[in-house]
Amino acid sequence: MPLAPHQFWQAMDAPDTHRQPPDGWADGFPATLPDGRQLLLPIRILPGDGTAAVASLIINQASFAVEDAISAAMADLLRSHAPDVVIGVPTLGLPLANNVARRLNHKRMVALGTSRKFWYRDELSAPMSSITSPTHQKTIFLDPRSLPLLEGQRVAVVDDVISSGTSMAAVLKLLAQAGLEPVAIVAAMLQGNRWKEQLRDWHDRIAAPLASPRLQRNAAGRWLAEA
Protein backbone atom coordinates (compact mmCIF):
# COMPACT_ATOMS: atom_id res chain seq x y z
CA MET A 1 0.00 0.00 0.00
CA PRO A 2 1.45 3.43 -0.93
CA LEU A 3 2.44 5.69 1.95
CA ALA A 4 0.44 8.83 2.65
CA PRO A 5 2.55 12.02 2.28
CA HIS A 6 2.96 12.46 6.05
CA GLN A 7 4.17 8.87 6.46
CA PHE A 8 7.43 9.32 4.56
CA TRP A 9 10.65 9.93 6.51
CA GLN A 10 9.27 8.36 9.68
CA ALA A 11 11.16 5.05 9.94
CA MET A 12 14.36 3.37 8.88
CA ASP A 13 13.56 0.01 7.28
CA ALA A 14 15.63 -3.15 7.43
CA PRO A 15 18.11 -3.88 4.62
CA ASP A 16 16.52 -5.11 1.38
CA THR A 17 13.01 -4.10 2.49
CA HIS A 18 12.55 -2.18 -0.75
CA ARG A 19 13.69 -3.78 -4.02
CA GLN A 20 13.25 -2.17 -7.39
CA PRO A 21 10.17 -3.46 -9.22
CA PRO A 22 10.86 -4.60 -12.80
CA ASP A 23 8.86 -1.73 -14.29
CA GLY A 24 10.31 0.99 -12.01
CA TRP A 25 9.39 2.89 -8.87
CA ALA A 26 5.89 4.30 -8.36
CA ASP A 27 5.69 6.80 -5.50
CA GLY A 28 8.83 6.25 -3.45
CA PHE A 29 12.55 5.56 -3.85
CA PRO A 30 14.66 3.89 -1.10
CA ALA A 31 17.96 5.49 -0.14
CA THR A 32 20.32 3.25 1.79
CA LEU A 33 22.57 4.01 4.76
CA PRO A 34 26.07 2.49 4.91
CA ASP A 35 24.78 -0.17 7.34
CA GLY A 36 22.14 -1.27 4.83
CA ARG A 37 19.06 0.27 6.43
CA GLN A 38 16.73 1.94 3.97
CA LEU A 39 14.74 5.16 4.06
CA LEU A 40 11.82 5.35 1.64
CA LEU A 41 11.70 8.84 0.10
CA PRO A 42 8.77 10.36 -1.80
CA ILE A 43 9.29 10.98 -5.51
CA ARG A 44 8.81 14.65 -6.42
CA ILE A 45 8.24 15.59 -10.06
CA LEU A 46 10.44 18.51 -11.08
CA PRO A 47 9.06 21.61 -12.84
CA GLY A 48 9.00 21.18 -16.60
CA ASP A 49 7.45 18.55 -18.82
CA GLY A 50 6.79 16.04 -16.03
CA THR A 51 9.38 13.49 -17.13
CA ALA A 52 12.03 14.21 -14.48
CA ALA A 53 11.86 13.77 -10.73
CA VAL A 54 13.96 13.46 -7.58
CA ALA A 55 13.64 11.55 -4.34
CA SER A 56 12.94 14.12 -1.63
CA LEU A 57 14.36 14.37 1.89
CA ILE A 58 12.79 17.01 4.16
CA ILE A 59 14.58 16.44 7.45
CA ASN A 60 12.44 18.74 9.59
CA GLN A 61 9.44 16.57 8.71
CA ALA A 62 11.28 13.37 9.65
CA SER A 63 10.93 11.49 12.90
CA PHE A 64 13.63 12.04 15.50
CA ALA A 65 14.69 8.41 15.01
CA VAL A 66 15.35 9.03 11.31
CA GLU A 67 17.16 12.31 12.00
CA ASP A 68 19.31 10.56 14.60
CA ALA A 69 20.16 7.66 12.27
CA ILE A 70 21.23 10.01 9.48
CA SER A 71 23.12 12.33 11.84
CA ALA A 72 25.01 9.42 13.38
CA ALA A 73 26.11 8.28 9.92
CA MET A 74 27.14 11.84 9.01
CA ALA A 75 29.19 12.16 12.20
CA ASP A 76 30.93 8.87 11.35
CA LEU A 77 31.94 10.34 7.99
CA LEU A 78 33.32 13.48 9.63
CA ARG A 79 35.36 11.96 12.44
CA SER A 80 38.42 11.17 10.34
CA HIS A 81 38.59 14.85 9.31
CA ALA A 82 38.73 15.92 12.98
CA PRO A 83 36.80 19.20 12.56
CA ASP A 84 36.96 21.75 15.35
CA VAL A 85 33.73 23.48 14.30
CA VAL A 86 30.66 22.41 12.35
CA ILE A 87 29.00 25.04 10.14
CA GLY A 88 25.30 24.52 9.43
CA VAL A 89 23.68 25.61 6.15
CA PRO A 90 20.11 26.95 6.38
CA THR A 91 17.47 25.91 6.40
CA LEU A 92 17.41 22.16 6.66
CA GLY A 93 21.11 21.73 7.28
CA LEU A 94 20.77 23.44 10.67
CA PRO A 95 19.07 20.65 12.66
CA LEU A 96 21.52 18.15 11.17
CA ALA A 97 24.51 20.36 12.04
CA ASN A 98 23.25 20.66 15.61
CA ASN A 99 22.84 16.89 15.89
CA VAL A 100 26.17 16.09 14.24
CA ALA A 101 28.11 18.60 16.37
CA ARG A 102 26.72 17.05 19.55
CA ARG A 103 27.81 13.59 18.38
CA LEU A 104 31.31 14.95 17.79
CA ASN A 105 31.30 16.27 21.39
CA HIS A 106 31.42 19.88 20.26
CA LYS A 107 30.04 22.53 22.58
CA ARG A 108 28.20 24.34 19.78
CA MET A 109 27.92 24.76 16.04
CA VAL A 110 27.95 27.89 13.87
CA ALA A 111 24.83 28.61 11.84
CA LEU A 112 24.84 30.52 8.57
CA GLY A 113 21.69 32.54 7.89
CA THR A 114 19.43 33.80 5.12
CA SER A 115 17.78 36.55 7.15
CA ARG A 116 19.88 39.70 7.26
CA LYS A 117 20.49 41.30 10.65
CA PHE A 118 21.40 44.97 10.80
CA TRP A 119 24.98 44.26 11.89
CA TYR A 120 25.73 41.88 8.97
CA ARG A 121 28.24 42.98 6.31
CA ASP A 122 27.96 42.72 2.52
CA GLU A 123 31.42 41.18 2.20
CA LEU A 124 30.21 38.26 4.33
CA SER A 125 27.29 37.39 2.04
CA ALA A 126 26.66 35.56 -1.23
CA PRO A 127 23.60 35.00 -3.49
CA MET A 128 22.12 31.51 -3.28
CA SER A 129 19.41 29.43 -4.99
CA SER A 130 18.40 25.77 -4.84
CA ILE A 131 16.64 23.07 -6.87
CA THR A 132 13.65 23.16 -4.51
CA SER A 133 13.23 26.95 -4.84
CA PRO A 134 14.48 27.69 -8.37
CA THR A 135 12.66 31.01 -8.72
CA HIS A 136 13.40 32.29 -5.22
CA GLN A 137 16.82 33.93 -4.96
CA LYS A 138 18.17 34.14 -1.44
CA THR A 139 21.29 35.53 0.16
CA ILE A 140 23.46 33.49 2.52
CA PHE A 141 25.17 35.34 5.38
CA LEU A 142 27.93 34.67 7.88
CA ASP A 143 27.42 36.59 11.10
CA PRO A 144 30.62 38.61 11.63
CA ARG A 145 30.30 37.89 15.35
CA SER A 146 30.88 34.21 14.54
CA LEU A 147 34.20 34.81 12.80
CA PRO A 148 36.33 34.44 15.96
CA LEU A 149 34.84 30.95 16.40
CA LEU A 150 36.02 29.91 12.91
CA GLU A 151 39.33 31.64 12.24
CA GLY A 152 42.26 29.27 12.51
CA GLN A 153 39.97 26.27 13.05
CA ARG A 154 39.32 23.10 11.07
CA VAL A 155 35.78 23.72 9.86
CA ALA A 156 33.31 21.28 8.30
CA VAL A 157 30.12 22.21 6.47
CA VAL A 158 26.89 20.26 7.08
CA ASP A 159 23.85 20.46 4.79
CA ASP A 160 20.81 18.32 4.08
CA VAL A 161 20.94 17.63 0.33
CA ILE A 162 23.41 18.48 -2.43
CA SER A 163 21.66 18.33 -5.81
CA SER A 164 22.64 20.92 -8.43
CA GLY A 165 25.52 22.11 -6.25
CA THR A 166 24.59 25.77 -6.59
CA SER A 167 23.69 26.27 -2.93
CA MET A 168 26.91 24.66 -1.68
CA ALA A 169 28.93 26.66 -4.23
CA ALA A 170 27.45 29.83 -2.71
CA VAL A 171 28.36 28.65 0.79
CA LEU A 172 31.94 27.93 -0.28
CA LYS A 173 32.19 31.36 -1.94
CA LEU A 174 30.97 32.99 1.27
CA LEU A 175 33.46 31.07 3.41
CA ALA A 176 36.31 31.90 1.02
CA GLN A 177 35.45 35.59 1.39
CA ALA A 178 35.96 35.09 5.12
CA GLY A 179 39.29 33.33 4.56
CA LEU A 180 37.89 29.90 5.45
CA GLU A 181 38.42 26.62 3.59
CA PRO A 182 36.45 23.62 4.92
CA VAL A 183 38.27 20.36 5.55
CA ALA A 184 35.08 18.46 4.68
CA ILE A 185 31.52 18.88 3.42
CA VAL A 186 28.98 16.34 4.61
CA ALA A 187 25.37 16.25 3.43
CA ALA A 188 22.63 13.87 4.45
CA MET A 189 22.10 12.94 0.80
CA LEU A 190 23.74 13.41 -2.59
CA GLN A 191 20.95 13.76 -5.16
CA GLY A 192 22.00 12.76 -8.67
CA ASN A 193 25.35 13.73 -10.20
CA ARG A 194 24.79 17.25 -11.52
CA TRP A 195 26.49 18.74 -8.46
CA LYS A 196 29.81 17.27 -9.60
CA GLU A 197 30.37 19.94 -12.25
CA GLN A 198 29.53 22.83 -9.95
CA LEU A 199 31.73 21.44 -7.16
CA ARG A 200 34.41 19.75 -9.28
CA ASP A 201 37.28 21.05 -7.12
CA TRP A 202 35.73 19.60 -3.96
CA HIS A 203 34.94 15.97 -4.86
CA ASP A 204 37.50 14.52 -2.46
CA ARG A 205 36.04 16.48 0.46
CA ILE A 206 32.32 15.78 -0.11
CA ALA A 207 30.54 12.81 1.45
CA ALA A 208 27.03 11.71 2.41
CA PRO A 209 25.54 8.58 3.97
CA LEU A 210 22.61 8.57 1.52
CA ALA A 211 22.48 8.87 -2.26
CA SER A 212 19.63 9.01 -4.75
CA PRO A 213 19.60 9.38 -8.55
CA ARG A 214 17.67 11.85 -10.63
CA LEU A 215 14.73 9.91 -12.00
CA GLN A 216 13.16 9.65 -15.45
CA ARG A 217 9.59 8.63 -16.23
CA ASN A 218 9.44 5.51 -18.41
CA ALA A 219 6.80 4.36 -20.88
CA ALA A 220 4.89 2.66 -18.06
CA GLY A 221 4.59 5.97 -16.22
CA ARG A 222 6.97 4.82 -13.47
CA TRP A 223 10.41 6.01 -12.46
CA LEU A 224 13.92 4.73 -13.16
CA ALA A 225 17.35 6.22 -12.54
CA GLU A 226 18.36 8.80 -15.12
CA ALA A 227 20.60 7.31 -17.78
Image (cartoon, helix red, strand yellow):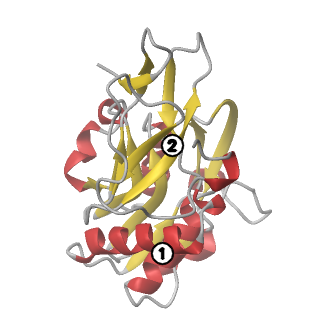
Q: Is residue 165 above or below residue 80?
A: above
**Tag shown at residue 167:** 2
Q: Residue at x 34, y 74 (%)?
A: 75
- Judged left or right of residue 69, residue 127 is right
View extreme (right): residue:
118
Tell me: 120 left or right of 162: right
**Residue type pointed to by label 2:** Ser
Q: Quadrant of the C terminus?
A: top left
* Marks 2 and 1, how far apart at CA: 24 Å
Q: Nearer the viewer, residue 178 or 31?
A: 31
Q: Position of residue 25 (x, y in %)?
A: 43, 31
Q: How many numbered tags mark residues here?
A: 2
Marks 2,1: beta carbons within 8 A: no
In the depicted view, which residue is nearer to us: 110 or 208? 208
Q: Measuring 43% from the left and 88% from the top, which residue is drawn there?
A: 106
Which residue in the structure is indicated by mark 1? 68
Q: Quadrant of the N terminus?
A: top right
In-image side of 136 versus 16 (left or right): right
Asked which quadrant contains residue 60, the reply is bottom right
Q: Please name the amino acid that badge 1 sits on.
A: Asp
Q: Nearer the viewer, residue 128 or 61?
A: 61
In the image, residue 34 above or below residue 30 = below
